[in-house]
Image (cartoon, rainbow, N blue to C red):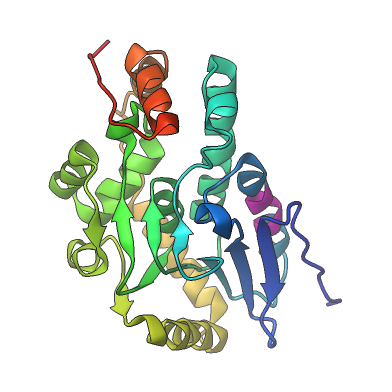
Amino acid sequence: MSAVIYQSITERVKVWLDKDGSTLQIQFNNPSRHNALSVDMWEAVVPLLNTAESDDRIRLVVFSGAGEKAFVSGADITQFEDLRAAQEAVARYESLAEQALMGIYNFSKPTLACIQGYCIGGGVNVAMSCDIRIASSDSVFAIPAARLGLGYRYSALKNLVDLVGPAMAKDLFFTARRIDANEARHIGLITRVCEKSELPALEVEYKKALAENAPITVRAGKAIIAEILKASPEIDHDTCRQLIRDCFDSEDYSEGRRAFMEKRKPAFRGK
């Protein structure tokens, strides 16, 4: 087939093919803000995956963060007030994030999150949407929604429960505490941990394995595992969506947003 040209819709997401063409690299490129995710970054993911879906050369997609300080540190706070304050803006932001994350999760070929540094909030969601997660030993993980008054999507919480189990999911979500790479590996949030200097070699190990193994077998295995993990038809999704809307409509969310922007501790009242 003719060469496929990959181009991101924003400079804040870099994209390139490895030399052999078997691995597509998608890098979040907002290092001045620790690769915090802006709307244009969410928007860039799905078109890239759609192109990779039909590119027979691609055996693996790797997600990483620019620089050495962060994979993804959460939402870009410079857009926080404008894009997540009003009800319609919240719905749009959540829809874009959901499309990107489900695009990664439902992508038919293997995906790998290569994590170094901060992996917070949306970064954890990106990582959980990938099939495999490797990290350097200096990485830090947290889900700080409860400190911000945010509603958390069903799909994100399901991914968390599927990976670490309900007890540990409650621990991480309720407390919003930070954990290091070793604890993240111990609870199953990530797959493997290595020293910072060894992370490139570990990534190459996965790229080499996926380039050599039978792609039809790998894709079949991924699809069957996805069937195994499907949710029960008895789940009340309407209630889940309303609970999320209630969070974003609350006074606590307004307080959490203001406190985040003002870099102070929020005073939640449960209203």
Q: State the image quarter where residue 62 is shown.
A: bottom right
Quadrant of the rendered image containing residue 95: top right
Q: Main secondary structure of the magenta part?
A: helix
What residue span does the magenta drawing correspond to? 44-49
Q: Residue 200: horizontal and vertical position, in percent?
A: 47, 84
Question: How many labels were placed on the picture?
Answer: 0
Tell me the quarter of the image containing the N terminus: bottom right
Q: What's the residue at 29%, 33% (across, down)?
A: 147
Say whether residue 185 is left or right of residue 134: left
**Can you see residue 231?**
no
Q: Nearer the viewer, residue 203 or 224?
A: 203
Q: Position of residue 65 (x, y in %)?
A: 53, 64
Q: Is residue 112 visible?
A: yes
Residue that extends furthest to the right in the rendered view of this protein: 2
In percent of width and height, residue 235 lies at 31, 29
Snapshot quadrant of residue 221:
bottom left
Q: Residue furthest left?
A: 167
Asked if residue 40 lies in the magenta stretch, the reply is no
Q: Quadrant of the C terminus?
A: top left
Q: Is 47 contained in the magenta span?
A: yes
Residue 60 appears left or right of 247:
right
Q: Relative to 44, say whether 78 is above or below.
A: above
Q: Where is residue 149 shown, x and y percent of the image?
A: 33, 26
Residue displayed at 23% across by 14% down: 270
